Structure formats: structure tokens, C-alpha cells
Amino acid sequence: MKNTIICLLVLSTVMACKPKETNSKEKLPDAKAFGYLHLVGKLGDAPLHMNLIQDQDYDGKPWYNGSYTIDDIQEPIGIYTISDTTGQDLLILDEMGTPDDKVGEFKGKLTDGSFTGTFTSKEGKELPFALDFSYPEGSLKFTTVRVEVSKKADEKLKDSPKATFRYEFVKPKQDWLRFVLLGEVVGDSLAQVYKTIENAYIQEQKPFFDSYLEEAKAQIGEDSDFNPSFLNYESEKSMDVLFNQDNLLSIAVVDYSYSGGAHGNYGSSCASFDLTKQKKITLEDLFKPGYEKTLTDALNAAARKKYGVKKLDEVLFVDKVEPNGNFFVTGKGICFNYTPYEIASYAQGEQRIFVPFAELKGVLK
């Protein structure tokens, strides 16, 4: 599932700390650990930031997913690991896209705290890149945690199907931020009850397994020819770091579940936090009263540009995209996130539409 929807994932040794005032290279986490990497450097002459989650693929090799931003635009572009068939032990990161899309590709070596190599744009232009694993002032380190537990549907069956409950998250040092991130995972009301992400993991798994065992027992008893794979249920909550610089943090909480059928369901809930003011950012924090029409017009113009169409219903379920509460910001724009089926098909995946603040000057505070 992690390779399908590009989510997160063993407790890493990367420890949370205050923002640093230097740009010195950090030591990379062990290749077999689950970790978070913040890489800073240049693509050609352009300053670039990259946020990656490190995990292990099914073959035991390091696997990465995340996003990067060019500083003069700051539109996050999703990237993920593809297999290296060169035999040169390279790290290859492709931009997100459909199978028919032409995408950009980073290809290089990740060693000694640096990621260096060549980027090939979707137009075929090649540029060198050189990035260091570092945390400049205004960015945060995190502890990264992956915990999971599984239960069999029937302990008496040799090849019994099972359900798996999993949490994968980044954990900051700051108490206030840990608590608001917990609220993004379980909701503000339950955050008041659970207090910590670890307790939430313990408390949330019980109703999941109770429901699973009851349903599995009924299906196994009713149909001796049941397909075991349809009862390999999953529930997973994970986090992506979308932007982490200049005292601005943006994250996505990814909620995935599989409860039988052809595929699972997933969706991301995004949020941004002002690290100086120690608060979650709202639309009202960003825009003057009466901003709605200007924002909607700019959002639809950005969508038509993104998809290369004059009418959005040529590629989407809708002919007009409305701003929703599922958004995050960078230093130079706002990005709205739409989960599968919200404005597009499951096969098209989540849709993110970025609007530069330059297009919203009249309504920005």
C-alpha cells in the first residue's frame, strides 16, 4: 500500500531539537531506519528544499517519498523512489504523475549527508543538483515513529487472514506542536482525551479490531469458499512533511483503510502552522474579509493551467473548483487538497492545486 499511495513509515534515531542557526550537514539516519530528511541546496542555480520520509521497501532497500520546492516559486512537487536498474546504486526520485505523464527525475547518490546528481526535467533538460542534509534556522527536526500491530481473523486457521493497525508519524520536541499535530490525527476533541499520539494509537486500535473480528467471524462462518485476501484489513494513519522552513510548517495526515474489495480508500488532511506565533493558520489569517470570489477565481485559473484545459469538466467531475478547508501554505502560495472522488476519480488520485500569493495580492493581509 505504501508504494501505491506514497505514504509514510521502527523508531529512528533522529531527535527533535530547536532550529539551528547554521546550514552544516547532518549525519544521515541509518539506511534501515524510518526517518525524516530535510535537504537544502541548489538545482542548477536555483535554491531548493526537499522533504523526504525514509523507509524500507519490500526488498529491504531504502525507499523515499516526499516533495521539493524551488525557493522562488515554493510550489511543492511530490516525488517518490523508483527502482534503480542501472546497477550503480543510485537514488532515483520521480515527480508524481499519472502513468502517461512526462515527469521530472532526480538521479544521484545519497551519501555522507549529501544528495548529488542530475535532474532531468519533463521537457528533457538536464541540470546538476547538490543538496545537503541540514536544518537551517527556521526549520524543525523530528523524531519519527512507526508502530503497528496485527491480529488474525481465526487463530485456528493456518493461513488465516489478518487485520493490521498502523501509525506512522513525525514528532516534534515542542509540546504545543505535538498536541496540535495530535489534533490533526484524531480530532481536537479526542486529542483532549488521549493527550499523546502514543495513547491515541493504543486506544484507537481496540474498536478497529473488535469490528474486524466480528465481521471476519461472520464471513468465515457463512462462506467456506471466502477469499482470504479480502479479509486482510488495514487501518493506517501517517504524516507527510510538505513544507518546513522560515518558521512555517505544513503537514498532511494521510488516512488509509482497506476493508475488502478491489482497493483501499485514502485521503489527506492538510494543515499549516506559524511556528513563531505557535498557531494553526486559517484562511482568515491570510485574507481580508470578502476574499472568497478573488480566491475562487484564482483557484480555477490555476486549475485550468495545471490541467491544460479551458473547461475543467474535461478532466474533472466538476466544472468549477471551490476552495475547501483542506489546504496548506508555503511562503509564496496556498495549495488546496482534494481527496479521491471529491473532484476527480480514484484512478486520478488526490488533486492538489497551488495558487501563488502573487495572484492574490488584492485580498492578502
Image (spheres, rainbow, N blue to C red):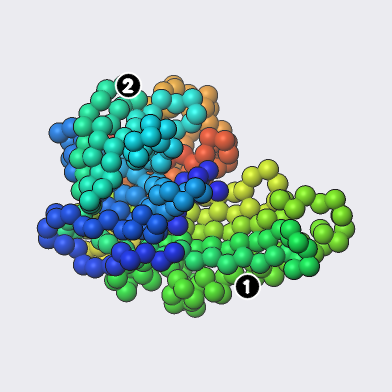
Amino acid type of the residue tagged 2 in the rendering: Glu
Give the residue drawn at x 75%, y 53%.
228
Answer with left or right where residue 147 lies relative to residue 26. Answer: right
Residue 155, above or below 95: below
Most extreme residue toward the front, as rendered?
87
Q: Nearer the viewer, residue 318 or 208?
A: 208
The span from disc 2 to disc 1 (Cα, nearest Å) is: 50 Å
> Is there any visible trace of residue 304 in the rendered image?
no
Q: Secondary structure at mark 1?
A: helix
Q: Residue at coordinates 26% horizontally, 48% vertically from top-left?
A: 111
Percent coordinates x, y for residue 210 in the rendering = 69, 70
Mark sitting earlier along the chain (2/1)? 2
Q: Which mark is residue 317?
A: none
Coordinates of residue 141 in the picture (x, y in percent): 27, 62
Indicate the position of residue 319 as horizontal and vertical percent values: 51, 30
- In this figure, which residue is indicated by the disc labeled 2? 123
Give the percent coordinates (x, y) of residue 337. Answer: 44, 45
Q: Label 1 is placed on what type of residue?
A: Lys
Residue 155 against residue 273 in the figure, above or below? below
175 to 66, vertically: above or below: below
- The answer to whether residue 21 is left or right of residue 151 is left
Q: Quadrant of residue 305?
A: top left
Residue 65 vs residue 322, the one in the foreground: 65
Locate residue 161: give its quadrant. Answer: bottom right
Q: Pointer 1: residues within 10 angstroms few (<14), some, or many (20+)? A: few
Residue 216 appearing in the image = yes
Q: Nearer the viewer, residue 25 or 72?
A: 25
Mark 2 residue element: loop
Q: Which residue is mark 1?
A: 206
